Amino acid sequence: MFNRTAHSNVKGKNKDNDFVSRSFKRLVKNDFGNYLTLRLRYSNESQIIHNRRRDLKAKHVHIQDEATVLKKINIMINGGSDKLQVVTDFDFTLTKTHKNGNKTLSSFCIFEKSKQLPEAYFLESQRLLNKYRPIELDPKIPKEEKIKALDEWMSLCNDLYQGLHYNIDELDKLVEEYGETLRDGTIELFHHLKIQEVPVLVFSAGLGDVVKSVLKHHKILHDNVNIVSNFLKFNGNVTEGFQNPEKLLHVYNKNEESVDEKYHELLKERTNILLMGDSLGDANMADGASKESVILRIGFLYHHVEENLPLYRDTFDIVLVDDSTMNIIEEILSPVSKKF
Ligand SMILES: [Mg+2]
């Protein structure tokens, strides 16, 4: 997709030139470095993927079934960008888990940096976090139990978000201060997806208002980007819970039932799907896709690595451990170009 010499005026010519230079350097680095690198060769009959096996041995790249991964990538290349769509989680997928040695903030946590919130809110929010977050992260807890707990957590959050005095204008300022946490290469990735007119669904169980503000802040809320998330309902400067309290999203219910009919159609038309997430539940984000669809699932793993890795390898096609970049995604999507 990412023809490294084709540019648009999305960010201006200079920016594009900068990108070419950076991309080229990264490409060179990848050639000799430890990243997964796929090299393509065309034959008369078919497209053949050659991978450099030494790159697949990179410590942080884990692939359960290499042959299937290569087959999926080949289908994506053959389909071109007209058949492609991207479905991605937001918190700790588009954003890093840590930066300069510090943990980064989730979308909900950025909201909570506001000085407008009362002490009672923080006490209750912390109580809920201490109770439910360990359940969400514990790999030993069965999925059904997690779903029940997270439904309960979101419902209690909806109660908590009622009647708060909150001037939404402050959100953009908080994002300026705390929202500089996108993975390296995310901005370039979104610009290229825009150029190639590839739909991007940002499917977030976080706080939609913050997700939107972060994407806007980085100028990547292009018209090919859709956000499905939990958005607050405001009455003036007072919150009234979430906009859609019957359909509150958490990591285990982000699937076909959470997207509207319009997006359902898109899921069906664009049968090659690149999916990115950092929670096991994220792997189901494209469940509404048709049976013929090819879904390449990429999982970012940072928490409980040793315990989680076997399950992540079973769930995602490619697992990237403690990777703060979009390098692998760029490498995979580079050869997918619009067919003319
Ligand atoms: Mg996440």
Image (cartoon, grey):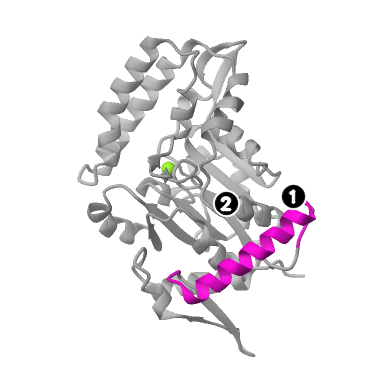
The crowd level at tag 1 (other Cα within 10 Å; few <14, some 14-19, many 20+) is few
Image height of 324 relative to 80, above or below: above
**Residue 321: percent from left, percent from top:** 36, 57
Q: Secondary structure at mark 1?
A: loop
Can residue 294 be seen here? The reply is no
Marking on residue 303: none
Can residue 268 be seen here? The reply is yes
Q: In the image as oriented, which residue stretches furthest toward the front? A: 100
Report ligand 1 position as a quadrant: top left
The crowd level at tag 2 (other Cα within 10 Å; few <14, some 14-19, many 20+) is many
> Which part of the image, by quadrant, shows the C terminus?
bottom right
**Residue 42: percent from left, percent from top:** 61, 85
**Residue 183: percent from left, percent from top:** 51, 49
Q: Identify the amino acid type marked 2.
A: Thr
> Which part of the image, by quadrant, shows the N terminus?
bottom right
Q: Is mark 2 within 8 Å of ligand 1?
A: no
Q: Secondary structure at mark 2?
A: helix
Tell me the magenta residue range: 7-35
Residue at (35% x, 29% y) in the render: 151
Reading the image, the residue beneath label 1 is 11
Reading the image, the residue beneath label 2 is 186
- The reply to whether the C-beta atoms of the residues labelled 2 and 1 are less than 8 Å apart is no
Of 118 and 103, the residue lying toward us: 103
State yes or no: residue 307 in magenta. no
Of 184 and 250, the residue lying toward us: 184
Q: CA distance from mark 2 to mark 1?
A: 14 Å
**Residue 40: percent from left, percent from top:** 57, 80
Badge 2 or badge 1: first in the primary sequence: 1
Q: In the image as oriented, which residue stretches furthest toward the bottom? A: 44
Residue at (33% x, 16% y) in the render: 124
